[in-house]
Amino acid sequence: MAAKSEANRTWTVGELADELGVTTRTLRFYEAEGLLTPQRAGANRVYSQRDRARLRLILRGKRFGMTLGECREIVDMYDGAASSERRQLETLLARLDEIAGDLRARQMDLRRTLAEVKEVAGQCRSRLAELRV
C-alpha cells in the first residue's frame, strides 16, 4: 500500500479483516446491516479510518455482550456532531454498568456452581474410597 498519512489510510476487506481478527464475511455482514459503508474502487471495497473506528467500536460492543442494535446506536452517535459525544458517553456508560452488573451476577453464580461441583466431587471421592475397602 502506498504511504499515506494515518488519517487518509485505507484498507482492503482482507487487510481490515486480518488487522482486526474477523472474517471478510463479518465485514460484508456489517456492511449489509448498514454499520459500515466502505467506498468502492471498481469491484473492491475500500475501508477508511472511519470504517475502521466503527468496526472497532462494534467489535468491542459485541465482546461486552451488546446486541447489534446497541452497537449501532453507539456507532451512529460516533458519527454525530461533537455535541452528541456527551449522549454517546452517557448511553455507553449506562449499558456498561448493566453489563458489569450482569457479569458480577454470573460470576457469583459460577462461584456457587463451582463450590457445589467441588462438594459433589468430594462426596463421590469419599464414596469411591469406601467402596474400595
Image (cartoon, rainbow, N blue to C red):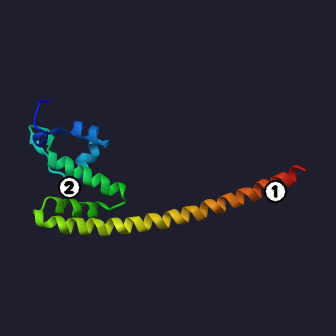
**Residue 49 figure quarter:** top left
Q: Residue at x 10, y 37 (%)?
A: 5
Q: Residue at x 20, y 47 (%)?
A: 52
Extreme residue in the top direction? 2
Residue 129 image point, x, y percent: 84, 52
Q: State left or right for residue 78 relative to residue 65.
A: left
Up the image or down, 133 lies above or below 82; here it is above
**Disc 1 from disc 2: Cα separation:** 58 Å
Q: Residue at x 36, y 68 (%)?
A: 97
Quarter of the image containing the N terminus? top left
Q: State left or right for residue 106 relative to residue 75.
A: right
Q: Residue at x 14, y 46 (%)?
A: 38
Q: Which mark is residue 127?
A: 1
Asked which secondary structure carries label 1, the reply is helix
| Labels 1, 2: front one | 1
Asked which secondary structure carries label 2, the reply is loop
Q: Which mark is residue 35?
A: 2
Residue 61 image point, x, y percent: 31, 57
